[in-house]
Image (tube, grey):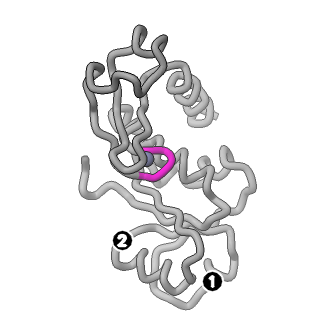
Amino acid sequence: MSQNRKKFLLDENLGKLAKWLRMLGYDSVVYKSISIEKKISLCVKERRIFLTRSKKIAKMNEHFFRILIRTEKYDNQLKEILPLLEINNEMFFSRCLECNNGLQAIKAENIDGLVPENVKHNFTDYKICRKCGKIYWHGSHYDAMKSKLKNLLTI
Ligand SMILES: [Zn+2]
């Protein structure tokens, strides 16, 4: 994974955008109930780009990299920041959509009982989030998200 790949910190009302960024393989954190000062200091310390819908935050007289998201819907929001992103197929689904943790490949024989039987019969390629235990596979959900993404990126 590239060390130079951009990292983001998003306001709580951008949760859906955060999921899409994670799907694209971007380290994207959303913190609940922490102060704006704390968020800014995390951005500076961890070299994250602050994505916000707040004009007040965007105009703050502080030294941190921030972007004001102007639209309401996540697909438009994704388009707004698209010029910043590097779309790399290999990075897709490398992070847990729920908790942003990096996913690890796991062998099918090690997930007995963890995924539905019909999934186990049809897929061999699995990844696991060691933080929340969620298991990902290249199933219909994956395909649906990928084709949706394709649409978003070509419009
Ligand atoms: Zn997780």
Q: Residue at x 42, y 47 (%)?
A: 132
- Label 1 sits on residue: 59
Q: Position of residue 56 (x, y in %)?
A: 68, 82
Q: Residues within 10 Å of mark 1 (few under 14, many from 20)?
A: few
Q: Label 2: state its secondary structure.
A: loop
Q: Position of residue 8 (x, y in %)?
A: 46, 62
**Magenta segment: does it hold 47?**
no
The quarter holding residue 153 reads top right
Q: Quadrant of the C terminus?
A: top right
Q: Residue at x 43, y 52 (%)?
A: 100
Label 1 C-beta lies within 8 Å of the nearest ligand 1 atom: no
Marks 1, 2: nearer the viewer: 2
Q: Residue furthest bottom?
A: 61
Q: Residue furthest top?
A: 121
Q: Is residue 87 left or right of residue 154?
A: left
**Magenta segment: does it hold 99?**
yes
Residue closest to the eye, 111 or 27:
111
Question: What's the distance in space between the residues labelled 1 and 2, CA to CA?
Answer: 19 Å
Residues in magenta, as a range: 96-100
The amino acid type of the residue labelled 1 equals: Lys
Q: Residue at x 46, y 57 (%)?
A: 28
Q: Residues within 10 Å of mark 2 (few under 14, many from 20)?
A: some
- Label 2 sits on residue: 47
Main SS, magenta residues: loop
User: Residue 70 got which mark?
Assistant: none
